[in-house]
Amino acid sequence: MREIRTQKAPAPVGPYSQAVEVNGFLFASGQIGINPETGKLEEGFKEQVRQIFKNLDAILKEAGLGRESIVKVTIYLTDISKFKELNEIYEDYFKDVPVKPARVTVGVKELPLGAYVEIEVVAVRG
């Protein structure tokens, strides 16, 4: 097992790794919309989602992977009425990926630091 860590994504807000790789699989911890340069949570919903995808890109890049390596996405939303807005940004993020990953979206009461959304991914090498 190998820990993946980059300063181009925010440090974990708890005692866990940004991501770990084992047997060709990368498990990225849930990301919220923290800007790693400021250490602050982005303010709006769309801004948080876009920042999350930037953070995930940085983690994937550190592991030598890209968006096309993502096989599973789990999304937690504090306001399920934002589902359409989320999908617009999500679709743009994966627009150049020929096989879209499996996905689940779950409505939750609240998330760490008052975030609107949290996204975790599983990626595979090869």
Image (tube, rainbow, N blue to C red):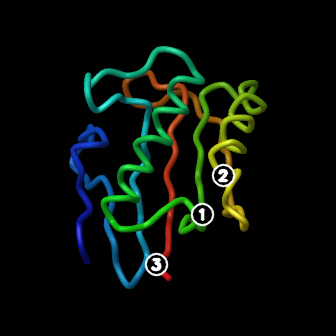
Q: Where on the picture, by quarter, is residue 116?
A: top right
**Extreme residue in the top direction:** 43
Tell me the SS state at disc 2.
Answer: loop
Amino acid type at circle 2 is: Phe
Label 3, secondary structure: give it. loop
Which residue is labeled 1 in the image? 72
Q: CA distance from mark 1 to mark 2?
A: 12 Å
Picture coordinates of residue 96 (x, y %)?
68, 56
Q: Are marks 2 and 3 in contact (CB under 8 Å)?
A: no
Q: Earlier in the sequence, mark 1 or mark 2?
A: 1
Residue at position x 26%, y 78% from top? 1
| Residue 43 in the image: above or below residue 94 | above
Question: CA separation, marks 2 and 3?
Answer: 18 Å
Task: Identify the disc placed on residue 94.
Answer: 2
Determine which residue is flagged by label 3: 125
Mark 3: amino acid: Arg
